[in-house]
Image (cartoon, rainbow, N blue to C red):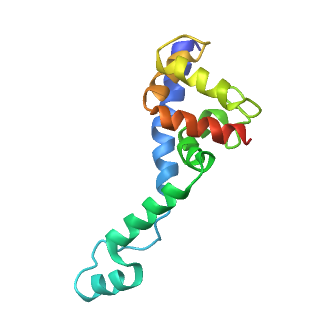
């Protein structure tokens, strides 16, 4: 296989695998709440505080999280290639690199610079990250 074919296969695995993984590993409780109205809805609001309470709790959790904790969540998109602990796989090992190294590499990819054979795959991934996401991911990787 040539590099283009490998890139397409990797992209397809990521494009279909990540959403499937995310749907199976989200923080929402199981069960069908889509047909809940009337008394069911009022009972749900009493139990949970309602949508506003849930959103406020999520915002408070995010505000009190460390950069490494936020980076762990943002790193979910990296797992397919770099492994859950940054141990590598399809992509290179990230564990053991400093935050500054990770930031530098991701910013190079974000600018469209070529760093190696898989640069084309990383350009689109890095483009989706804000500078804060990059800093947070780097903080998380530094803990690996």
Q: In this view, does 36 lie to the left or right of 2?
A: left
- Residue at the extreme left: 38
Going 53% across and 43% down the picture, which residue do you hit? 74
The image shows residue 18 at horizontal and vertical percentages of 50, 43
Q: Nearer the viewer, residue 17 or 140?
A: 140
With respect to residue 49, does 78 lie above or below? above
With respect to residue 67, does 53 lie above or below? below
Disc tally is 0
The N terminus, quarter of image: top right
Going 50% across and 37% down the picture, which residue do you hit? 133
- Residue at the extreme right: 96
The C terminus, quarter of image: top right
Going 35% across and 82% down the picture, which residue do you hit? 44
User: Does residue 25 appear in the picture of this structure?
Assistant: no
The image shows residue 73 at horizontal and vertical percentages of 55, 48
With respect to residue 44, does 19 lie above or below? above
Going 57% across and 41% down the picture, which residue do you hit? 75
With respect to residue 72, does 127 lie above or below? above
Q: In this view, does 36 lie to the left or right of 114?
A: left
The image shows residue 130 at horizontal and vertical percentages of 45, 33
User: Does residue 37 appear in the picture of this structure?
Assistant: yes
The image shows residue 112 at horizontal and vertical percentages of 47, 14
């Amino acid at each position: 296989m040539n590099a283009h074919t490998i890139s397409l296969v990797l992209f397809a695995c990521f494009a279909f695998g990540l959403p499937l993984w995310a749907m199976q590993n989200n923080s929402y409780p199981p069960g069908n709440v889509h047909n809940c109205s009337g008394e069911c809805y009022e009972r749900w609001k009493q139990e949970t505080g309602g949508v506003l309470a849930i959103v406020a709790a999520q915002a408070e959790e995010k505000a009190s999280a460390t950069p490494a904790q936020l980076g762990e969540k943002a790193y979910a998109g990296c797992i397919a290639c770099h492994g859950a602990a940054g141990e590598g796989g399809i992509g290179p090992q990230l564990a053991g690199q400093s935050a500054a190294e990770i930031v530098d590499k991701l910013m190079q990819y974000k600018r469209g610079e070529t760093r190696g054979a898989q640069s084309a795959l990383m350009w689109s991934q890095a483009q989706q990250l804000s500078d804060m996401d990059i800093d947070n991911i780097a903080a998380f990787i530094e803990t690996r």
